[in-house]
Amino acid sequence: MPMSPDFQHRLSTILPRIAEHYGTPFHIYDEAGIRETCRQLIDAFSGIDHFKEFFAVKALPNPSVMKIMKDMGFGFDCSSITELLLSRQLGCSTDDIMFTSNNTGVNEFRTAFADAGCILNLDDISLIDKLDKMPETICFRYNPGPRRKGNDIIGNPVESKYGVSHDQILSAFSLARSKGAKRFGLHTMLVSNELNYEYMVETARMLLDIIEDISSKLDVPFDFINIGGGLGIPYTPDDKPFDLASMAKEISALFETFKSAHSWAPKLYLESGRYMTGPHGVLVTTVINHKDTYRRYVGVDASMSCLMRPGMYGAYHHIHIHGKEQEPLREKVDVAGSLCENIDKFAVQRLLPRTCEGDLIIIHDTGAHGHAMGFNYNGHLRPKELLLKEDGSIELIRREETASDYFSTLNFEPDAIHP
Ligand SMILES: *Cc1c(COP(=O)(O)O)cnc(C)c1O
């Protein structure tokens, strides 16, 4: 079932007033729903001594939402300098930030070490020599290659640019140890939007096996394993929800077994993005045109600059029309934006109730990788973001872009050379 039904209920009576006050298009997020998902995650893993979620900032890089995560005791998974800066602004300490980058540049490492620092997750063995200093805690991202399959979305690990290969992993830890690292972590990320929880259980099993093996060969005390993100959400009405409880139960059992065999167990880290906020956000847009040519088009005031997933991946986002939830699905339409790309469609040949100009269209599940993937191609501007708070009030948490934002990078000191 796409979009949290509680959110839909909370939004239904107040949506016209919100649209009237703020204007469309906008993404709106549901604080109560986000907190509920955070609590479910914490409860699910309550059997593990040390569990911590590092919210994947790229899914929804808005400080107001990140504050909720921090308040729930979560850290942040960052993959760029800007994401690091965003997390630091919230007053995070070293252990609250996991910096997982790929093809990392020296500048990124300098920022990673600056201020409160972070937990550094290295993506390659060659990067060890590029660090100004070896931090006390170091993690490596592991790529199992042919040992695992990955899911359809993320692809085959052998073709993936991420991570240290199986043959290099022992040397990576050994080298880091010789350079002064004292505590160690092992990370991997093998699936994306996966609804079958067993992948995550397999990943936990795989990482526990590897640290067991490495610990028997090297004196490297493992502090944690990080099983990555990739937990899926049901985008279509037929998708079954991710079975969080079963995943947590089976992973907890693996930790139990590990602990009884070794009388210690690592901490468990997760860096989920989509699962945490995806169903708790929607894009609200207004019908502005109808066009009947070879197909019927419903033209809306948002474009794929607000939400790239349908155009880029052909991803399904469920749609309903405010006030017409019970009406029969009478028309097969394409719901289109105004970008000069034919992929700028939120839905293709979708059955919807008959629409009128001025109808509010609610595009579901945009709380993760939605606004964040917005862009400026064709001079299109990114929309505002709103938060429906637990007390029922609405807060603007990011304004829409304006033409002057677009022009701001054209405002600079002249700089020309004649080489
Ligand atoms: C994108 C990403 C995540 C989050 O993925 P979700 O599918 O949103 O859970 C976590 N870790 C890393 C390294 C990522 O690149």
Image: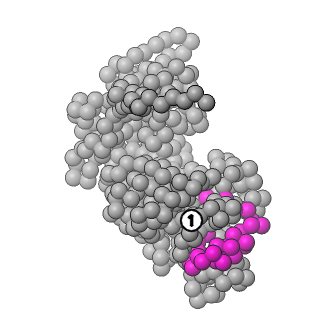
Q: Does residue 172 appear to the left or right of 293 in the view shown? A: right
Answer yes or no: disc 1 within 8 Å of ligand 1: no
Q: Nearer the viewer, residue 65 or 185?
A: 185
Q: Residue at x 38, y 64 (%)?
A: 92
Where residue 281 sits in the image (x, y, percent)? 39, 44
Give above or below for 135 relative to 84: below
Q: Does residue 143 appear to the left or right of 287 in the view shown? A: right
Res. 126 image quadrant = bottom right
Judging from the image, what secondary structure is the residue with disc 1 in? loop
Res. 403 image quadrant = top left
Where residue 232 sits in the image (x, y, percent)? 54, 52
Give the magenta-colored segment's residue range: 163-189
| Outermost residue, front side | 418
Res. 380 image quadrant = top left
Tell me if residue 182 can be seen.
yes
Q: Does residue 409 appear to the left or right of 350 in the view shown? A: left
Q: Residue at x 33, y 49 (%)?
A: 30
Residue 166 on the magenta segment: yes
Where residue 325 sits in the image (x, y, percent)? 37, 34
Q: Nearer the viewer, residue 43 or 398?
A: 398
Check disc 1 and give the amino acid type. Answer: Asp
Tell me if residue 225 can be seen.
no
Give above or below for 228 relative to 364: below
Q: Nearer the viewer, residue 114 or 412?
A: 412
Q: Residue at x 53, y 54 (%)?
A: 107
Q: Are there few (<14), some (14-19), or many (20+) residues within 10 Å of tag 1? A: few
Q: Which residue is mark 1?
A: 132
Q: Residue at x 31, y 54 (%)?
A: 32
